């Protein structure tokens, strides 16, 4: 591990990739590195499928690299619950990794959710710490998904940015409420399409209900580049919204608890025993909890 | 298997037919692997950078334009130059019999033509990762022969 | 009165047959709107479909020799396959072209290549079909210049450019620019050709590659017609009157193994295109509502196993295309899953068409399957399902917006993977693959290509760049950049660039400077 860490610090990307795999496979852990700088280190970019997250992130990376930042991306995609495999396709949308002038300032790594139930495995936080540790300035976690499990990204990131598309005519759905509660900023992509402006207005309205400290809502077109410069600088200087701190800690607690259970060496065998009726649920759960205490 | 294997499926060269590559990517996903598809028209350098950053242990190359004879060996060579000799390379597409020996020579471990089943690819992968001489760094040597 | 091929029409056994059946007034007549039964009343009784076989070779000189041979044997039209660097607007000496020059077609980087390709071929006498999309404007400009050097003016040349960029994003992959800029190039071509090259078919809107990528028949039809609507919209937005360009739109479909579904698909396609055009654009020229199409049988249906069985598959597919009323047809060679066709296999492919035309009798009666309960109901169902799919794409903002979201790509891929799993699981039987299999040794044929093509092209381009007035070329390339930016029609400037020996790659690079490049969502 020390060799790989030194090599990764010296810029060996293969050594870095190997370290990240070890973390992913549960062989290594990293803790939060100390930082003097008060700005954010880990940002989660989340939102429903099809809103153009990867395309927008690509635009932001171009901007941030132009401003001298070195940014790593952890792009999370779901594992198939049936086979355990995953298709990790976000990289295709990242033109910045093909840009000879910029590719040394960007690192993109695809991550599958594996056994985790939420949208982001907690192990991603350790991976992000590792990246910061070896000298990357900022880490962006991109999550694909919809629905309530998205709030889990609060457990791994310092800032949460929600990406939305144009209105689909159904207003702001209830299932988004949790995520909106946690978001530090909202970006509505595809400003060139009908309904984008309307959706931005709907979101502003619903965010301002009862909140002084409502996050900013920006309109952009990742495809055409409109509004990207503004979004880039807004996000670089993004502060954590205070209204969400309780919810954020809640997600971290839940996430840690799940990780403890999942990492228990007997997890799979206890699960089988419950399924086969060889053990009661309560006994199995008690054993899982005790084993880690 | 303990952890899923990380596999890059890449389209080097200029041809835009990726039905085969995408079907293979999905079939390997359904066999429990984590598959990164590169998209069309990747240069050898872009492909090995993907393999490196994604820490993939296997690299599948698909070409239907007839440029395999030029591109596959170049990718194998680039992997070795970048000290990535443990990566296992396999290929697919319409690849004539006569073109196969030089590809095996270059370190490609399997060539899958039309009509290959996903089971055969899964069997190849399971076999190759167990061997200690399947990495592209070992150069010419063992390659997959389904009739064995 | 149309002239007929024969004066007497009867079955093999001597029974008389009418041109078509119209049992009562409620039944549509062939040649009348909405054209379910065909766009010509007498169909193949007046003229058989055009048997057009697509071919490509490595160098311009070799292709030229083959073209002249084909013309000597009585062929009237040429069909050019370009290599991948040409299709992507790259010069043969571009580093990205390495290993690809002359591989899947002829390599054309500069005017001299185009001169060689059509040397001693009278361009006022032949029509030429070019499978070219992203750089279609540049290749057509080269063709115009070569024709003019022969003394043939632009008004006299005829042919087709594929020029269908939307299906490249969806299925075929040889796109270069982002969609909105690609659409602008296409409308520039429509506009320029409508006044300057009036006999040219400016686009061949293709479902072929969509089907090859794995779509169903309904998806093929829906995605193709929805792409066509996007082109019509885009031209109308530019201010072109629909009747100035719509009569020159042509289509290109696939024909797969499901015989009755395919016949129904072609019937539904004509009716649906007619209805869409009438409802959305109200053209006054009837030709603006008639769907004319070329068909190629399904390459993807050919098996590497027991390859001779493919002759039967091609026959079934070609028969469906003819019964569906195609205007022209390419039949595949049985050995295409194993490499480039031999002269023998290519001949059998052509003979298959001739047997259908001359011996089977299906060409003697128009729309032979009309009135079958099954065919009529399938036609209606394909019409309805395609129409709702088109409306779904409309609701996403049209074909272009849907492509940018990866919608069509994803739908096609899902179908392709389902098909793959059906074959692997055995629920779909393919003879020779998972049914009626035999122990056999699959021999993929070596590709015999001229290895000197790339080297020759390098030398030619080196010489060209040394001997031309490169400062003049740079001035024109700058004009291309300005026009790309300010929206003026690029076609005349590209012709000027070609006349001054700018290369394909240089012209495309100048456009890339303004338009940028693009990577379409893969649909994963």
Image (cartoon, rainbow, N blue to C red):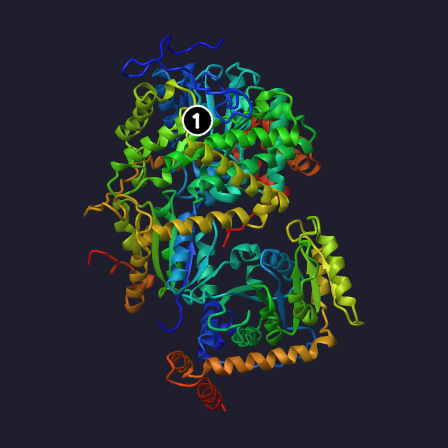
Q: Position of residue C67 (x, y in %)?
A: 38, 22
The vertical placement of C377 against B2, above or below, is above
In this rendering, would C385 be left or right of C21? right
Q: Chain of mark 1?
A: C
Q: Residue at x 69, y 80 (%)?
A: A246
In this rendering, would C207 be left or right of C177? left
Check disc 1: other Cα within 10 Å, few if <14, some if 14-19, many if 20+: many
For the residue labelled by badge 1, is the local secondary structure a helix, a strand or a loop? loop
In this rendering, would C285 be left or right of B132? right
| One can see residue B110 in this view | yes
The vertical placement of B146 against C520, above or below, is below
The vertical placement of B118 against C256, above or below, is below
The foreground one among A151 and C319 is C319
Q: Position of residue C257 (x, y in %)?
A: 36, 37
Which residue matches tag 1? C370
The foreground one among A172 and C118 is A172
Q: Quadrant location of residue C328? A: top left
């Amino acid at each position: 591990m020390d060799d790989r860490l030194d090599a990764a610090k010296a810029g060996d990307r293969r050594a870095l990739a190997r370290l990240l795999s070890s973390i992913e496979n549960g062989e290594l852990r990293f803790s939060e590195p100390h930082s003097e700088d008060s700005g954010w280190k880990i940002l989660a970019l989340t939102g429903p499928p099809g809103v153009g997250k990867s395309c927008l992130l690509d635009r932001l990376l171009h901007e941030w690299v132009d401003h001298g930042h070195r940014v790593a991306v952890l792009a999370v995609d779901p594992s198939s619950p049936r086979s355990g495999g995953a298709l990790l396709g976000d990289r295709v949308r990242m033109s910045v990794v093909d840009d000879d002038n910029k590719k040394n300032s960007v690192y993109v790594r695809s991550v599958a959710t594996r056994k985790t139930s939420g949208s982001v495995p907690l192990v991603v936080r350790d991976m992000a710490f590792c990246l910061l540790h070896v000298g990357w300035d900022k880490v962006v976690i991109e999550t694909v998904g919809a629905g309530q499990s998205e709030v889990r990204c609060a457990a791994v990131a310092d800032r949460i940015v929600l990406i939305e598309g144009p209105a689909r005519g159904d207003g702001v759905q209830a299932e988004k409420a949790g995520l909106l509660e946690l978001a530090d900023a909202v970006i509505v992509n595809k400003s060139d399409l009908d309904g984008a402006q309307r959706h931005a207005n709907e979101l502003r309205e619903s965010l301002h209900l009862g909140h002084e400290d409502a996050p900013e809502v920006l309109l952009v077109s990742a495809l055409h580049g409109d509004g990207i410069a503004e979004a880039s600088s807004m996000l670089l200087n993004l502060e954590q919204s205070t209204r969400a701190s309780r919810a954020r800690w809640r997600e971290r607690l839940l996430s840690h608890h799940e990780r403890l259970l999942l990492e228990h060496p007997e997890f799979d065998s206890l699960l089988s025993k419950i399924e086969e009726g060889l053990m009661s649920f309560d006994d199995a759960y008690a054993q899982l909890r005790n084993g880690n205490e | 298997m303990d952890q899923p294997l990380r596999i890059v499926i890449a389209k080097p060269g200029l041809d835009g037919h990726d039905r085969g590559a995408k079907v293979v990517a999905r079939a390997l996903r359904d066999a429990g692997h984590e598959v990164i598809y590169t998209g069309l028209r990747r240069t050898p350098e872009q492909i090995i950078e993907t393999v490196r950053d994604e820490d993939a242990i296997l690299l599948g190359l698909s070409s239907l334009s007839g440029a395999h004879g030029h591109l596959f060996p170049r990718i194998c060579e680039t992997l070795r130059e970048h000290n990535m000799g443990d990566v296992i390379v396999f290929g697919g597409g319409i690849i004539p019999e006569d073109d196969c020996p030089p590809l095996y020579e270059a370190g490609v471990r399997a060539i899958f033509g039309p009509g290959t089943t996903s089971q055969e690819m899964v069997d190849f992968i399971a076999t190759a990762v167990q061997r200690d001489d399947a990495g592209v760094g070992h150069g010419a040597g063992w390659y997959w022969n389904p009739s064995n | 009165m149309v002239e007929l091929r024969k004066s007497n029409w009867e079955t093999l056994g001597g029974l008389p047959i009418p041109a078509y059946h119209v049992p009562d007034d409620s039944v549509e007549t062939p040649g009348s709107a909405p054209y379910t039964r065909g766009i010509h009343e007498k169909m193949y009784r007046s003229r058989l479909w055009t048997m057009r076989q697509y071919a490509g070779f490595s160098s311009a000189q070799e292709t030229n020799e083959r073209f002249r041979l084909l013309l000597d044997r009585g062929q009237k039209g040429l069909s050019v396959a370009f290599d991948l660097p040409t299709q992507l607007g790259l010069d043969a000496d571009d580093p990205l072209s390495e290993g690809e020059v002359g591989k899947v077609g002829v390599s054309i980087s500069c005017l001299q290549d185009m001169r060689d390709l059509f040397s001693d071929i009278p361009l006022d006498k032949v029509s030429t079909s070019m499978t070219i999309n992203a750089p279609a404007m540049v290749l057509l400009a080269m063709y115009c210049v070569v024709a003019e050097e022969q003394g043939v003016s632009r008004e006299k040349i005829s042919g087709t450019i594929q020029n269908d960029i939307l299906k490249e994003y969806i299925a075929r992959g040889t796109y270069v620019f982002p969609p909105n800029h690609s659409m602008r190039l296409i409308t520039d071509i429509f506009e320029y050709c409508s006044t300057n090259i009036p006999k040219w078919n400016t686009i061949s809107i293709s479902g072929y590659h969509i089907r090859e990528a794995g779509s169903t028949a309904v998806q093929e039809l829906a995605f193709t017609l929805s792409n066509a609507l996007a082109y019509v919209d885009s031209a109308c937005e530019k201010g072109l009157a629909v009747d100035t360009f719509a009569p020159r739109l042509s289509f290109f479909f696939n024909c797969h193994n499901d015989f009755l579904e395919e016949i129904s698909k072609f019937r539904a396609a004509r009716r649906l295109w007619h209805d869409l055009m009438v409802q959305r654009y109200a053209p006054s020229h009837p030709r603006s509502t008639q769907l004319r199409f070329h068909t190629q049988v399904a390459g993807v249906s050919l098996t590497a196993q027991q390859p001779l069985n493919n002759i039967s598959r091609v026959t079934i597919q070609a028969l469906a295309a003819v019964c569906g009323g195609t205007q022209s047809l390419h039949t595949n060679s049985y050995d295409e899953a194993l490499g480039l066709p031999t002269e023998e296999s290519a001949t059998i492919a052509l003979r298959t068409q001739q047997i259908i035309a001359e011996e089977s009798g299906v060409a003697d009666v128009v729309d032979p399957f009309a009135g079958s309960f099954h065919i009529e109901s399938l036609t209606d169902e394909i019409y309805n399902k395609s129409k709702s799919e088109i409306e779904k794409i409309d609701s996403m903002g049209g074909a272009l917006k849907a492509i940018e979201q990866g919608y069509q790509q994803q739908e096609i891929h899902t179908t392709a993977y389902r098909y793959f799993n059906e074959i692997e699981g055995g629920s779909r039987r393919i003879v020779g693959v998972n049914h009626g299999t035999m122990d056999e040794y699959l021999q993929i044929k070596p590709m015999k290509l001229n290895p000197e093509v790339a080297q020759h092209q390098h030398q030619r381009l080196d010489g060209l760049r040394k001997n031309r007035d490169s400062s003049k070329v740079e001035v024109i390339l700058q004009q291309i950049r300005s026009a790309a930016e300010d929206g003026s029609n690029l076609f005349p400037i590209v012709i000027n660039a070609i006349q001054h020996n700018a290369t394909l790659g240089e012209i495309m690079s100048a456009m890339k400077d303004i338009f940028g490049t693009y990577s379409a969502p893969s649909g994963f």
